[in-house]
Image (cartoon, rainbow, N blue to C red):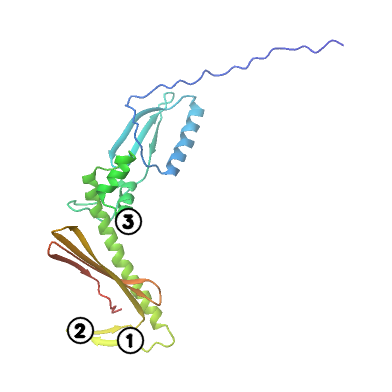
Amino acid sequence: MPPPETREMQIQTEPPTQYAGGDIDPYDGNMLMKVSKMENFIRLSTNHSAKCGSQLVLIDRDMNYGAFVRQVYKCPACCEELVLENCDKVKSTAVAEGASHSRHQPDFNLRMLKGADLAGVNTQKLAEFLHGELGIKIAAEHNLRKQETKVRKSIGVTYEARKIENREEHNQAVRERGDYRGDVQWSSQDGVAHLTSCGDISIDGGYATRSYNNRHRGKQAAVIVNSKATKKPLALAMSQVGYGISFTNWSIISSHL
């Protein structure tokens, strides 16, 4: 029996894709990136390239809004444009000092300033670390200081709302105790009657002297009041003295709810 006939088979392959290049200059810096946006763009771009058989070309890059980076890619086959953004844009309710209204701005701008303010890091150190040392694209320092006023306003509003919420919760928890003896009744100078709950609290604080040099020393103190019933803060008192001027922000400890 003769052996089976063999035939040489050839597989036709597409030529390797060549990068066509773009019309903008390359950027060798670093940036912050929201992972979900990167993953979504990878899925979208690879699917599009597989369908059209062409590599996307970078045609535009927008880096004029602080930490925000927007890159536009164009398909040379169908001319469709795909956009990659590293973060969302949000609009805060607080308005920056000197501004007439709030504008949409990168989410990263507000989040990094909020984190820095809560951690006690000023805008100069923030810029030196992120931009100076790591080369990450962020807003200019003067813009950071302006945007920080918006963040501080928002933190202040949140603090006042949470303080009232904690006091209401404290009053309710105290009054619901089985051994509660009742509120303290009193009247203000204008004759308005008030009721103040009687609940256990704890008060703690600290005092420090800040020495700048041999000719100047500043003093500061802070006191916090916590509820023993809910374990939450009810009031915060701060005092700072510098250059002979006292800046005091004393919160009312008693609650009239």
Residue at label 3?
119
**Residue in view at x 28 percent, y 69 percent:** 206
Residue 103 visible in this rendered orientation of the protein? no
Instruction: Please tell me which of labels 3 and 2 falls first in the chain.
Output: 3
Identify the element where label 2 is drawn: loop
Cα separation between marks 3 and 1: 39 Å
Residue 191 appears left or right of 205: left
Q: Place residue 136 in its image quadrant.
A: top left
Q: Which residue in the rendered view is the most extreme toward the top? A: 2
Instruction: Please tell me which of labels 1 and 2 falls first in the chain.
Output: 1
Amino acid residing under circle 1: Asp
Residue at label 1?
183
If the image is split into quadrants, where does the N terminus sit? Answer: top right
Cα separation between marks 1 and 2: 16 Å
Where does the image place residue 17, in percent across and percent down from the top left? 48, 21
107 up-or-down from 246: above or below: above
Where does the image place residue 213, in percent across and percent down from the top left? 17, 56
The front one of 36 and 148 is: 148
Where does the image place residue 4, in percent across and percent down from the top left? 80, 13
Rendered image: mark on residue 188: 2
C-beta proximity under 8 Å, tags 1 and 2: no
Amino acid residing under circle 2: Ser
